[in-house]
Amino acid sequence: MFRTPTTAGATAPWEELVTSALLGTDRRPSGTGPGTGPVALLDVAALHTVRRRAGLLPAAAAARPGTASADPRPPLPPAARHRLAQLLADRSAPTGAGGRRGAAPDLTELIPQWLATANLRGYRAPAALLPGLLDAARARTDLRPQALAFAGPRGLWLAGLNPEWKFALRGSSGGSPLPEVTAPEAVRRLWEEGLFAERVALLGAVRAHDPADALALLTSTWSTERAEDRLMFLDSLRAGLSAADEPFLEQALTDRSRNVRATAAELLSALPESALAGRMAARASSCVGPDLTAGADSVAVEAPHECDAAMQRDGVVAVPPSGRGERSWWLGQLVEAAPLFTWPGRFGGRTPQEIVALPVADGWAEELHAAWCRAAVRQRDREWARALLGAPSLPPSNSPGTASLAERSKLLATLPGAERAAWVAGFIAAHGLSEAFQLLGVCPVPWAEPLGRSVVDALDIARDAGSYPWSFSGVMGLAERCLNPAEANRLEVLTTTPDEPEGASPGAAGYWSEAFRRLVSTLRLRATMDAELLPEAG
């Protein structure tokens, strides 16, 4: 029960009461009166608390936030709106006993696809679901591009009112509309006075409209920008990169920042007609050519013996990573930056396929072919990419380019989508699924029929062989997201539990059946979700 504190205790400063509470009332009574203890201290603290609260004056009202920009996109159909609410409310992956996922679809893996379809069809996000959408994007960085595009101007406006959603403002205009790129005075004002995120967004918008105007804008303040800002601005030149950018990039080769210099050199090497590309071609040609001692049917390599100042100015990094030799490190950078059209003339008019098939002397084949792979990716050269990939039936260790699946994935990404899918389908047919996971990741979604059939056939073969099912869980997850939903009926036969062959992993048949049931149910749910996002679904 509360008792009236003594006069001494009631007038004791708050800081003194805190000290007494920390040290103990037996050591520091703090004016609560002789013979009193913790109860009296708490009584005094209660009285002080009431006084402090009663004495507070109301704070001045903050300025009301401005209104969000209008979003002219049409609203979601009712069924799709309900589906989005369900997806956002159930963002944790379902698991059963022993960590098994069960046969129910994993809704967490369907959110990115739902958002991509909604954005493709031009819908706006329901205002009531924006908080949940931003929370989902905060938790999963893979959702952010599609989620923020779907959230639109209202989502950015809302993100500006909550510090937990500040990620949404990075790289955007901060929720404020950008000026018309055809209004030079407004563009100039925002470029000179805006926040960094606003300036990045503005530069991207101007670059998309007129690359020359964007370059002029960037040049006007380049010398006064911070190094990290210069790097971000320079990176924006990748979009619409052309020979008109070369003079500016050549100047950037002498920038104070090493990262800026390296990026400028990379961009220049992506312009095959640039002066830097010519310098790199001359250096690479002096290192790689026909083996004159053994005839023209092999490749001789003489790696650089030094990395001089001119090479370093052109972006060659002098110090290799740990475990790499200096000369091989320098050679790889020279060949990677040299235009690929250098090599047919260097090797007597041979095609890329014929060049990569030539034997390479002194064990330099792996280093040389890996550099050619990086050059093909950087220069988006499809002919060289095809040559370096070789036939999909060849084992990776015997391929003409590189055995690295990561490098092969990058080469595939330079090819048209249908060609990518056909190549990976052939690879799976020849080698199975154990090495195909990275390659599948670069194929367009939904998978083309030959690729989808190849994946399903390989999974069926693994099931019939009694293979350990959990080693295929990654591919099965990809199939749930990437197979054409129209395949669901054809896959129904695989949902039954087969007899376990002799030597099979215990319980494998049940797991395979469960996985195929989940695959079929997920494909059917994807078909339903897609139908819900059609305009007539409302």
Image: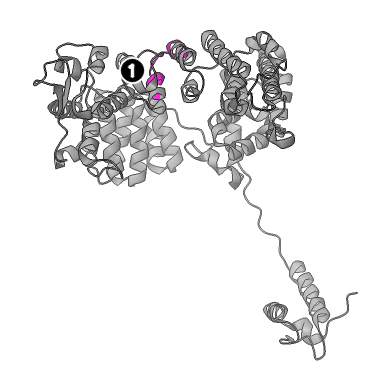
Q: Residue at x 45, y 38 (%)?
A: 198
* Magenta stretch contains residue 129: no
Where 39 falls versus 237 (above or below)?
Answer: below
Q: Residue furthest front?
A: 502
Closer to us: 19 or 355: 355
Give the image location of residue 76, x and y in percent. Answer: 68, 21
Where 8 falls versus 124 (above or below)?
Answer: below
Q: Is residue 396 left or right of residue 315?
A: right
* Magenta stretch contains residue 416: yes
Number of marks in the image? 1
Closer to us: 363 or 337: 363
Colour setup of the view:
one colour
Q: Residue at x 62, y 16 (%)?
A: 464
Q: Which residue is mark 1?
A: 385
User: Could you tell me if residue 80 is visible in this image?
Assistant: yes
Quadrant of the snapshot with the N terminus: bottom right
Q: Quadrant of residue 49?
A: bottom right
Q: Residue furthest bottom?
A: 34
- Crowding around mark 1 (Cα neighbors within 10 Å: few <14, some 14 to 19, many 20+) is many
Quadrant of the snapshot with the C terminus: top right
**Judging from the image, what secondary structure is the residue with disc 1 in?**
helix
Give the image location of residue 327, x and y in percent. Answer: 20, 38
Q: Is residue 180 left or right of residue 314?
A: right
Q: Amino acid at mark 1?
A: Ala
User: Could you tell me if residue 68 is visible in this image?
Assistant: no
Q: Quadrant of residue 476?
A: top right
Give the prevailing secondary structure in the magenta stretch: helix
Q: Which residues are magenta?
A: 410-421
Give the image location of residue 396, x and y in percent. Answer: 38, 21
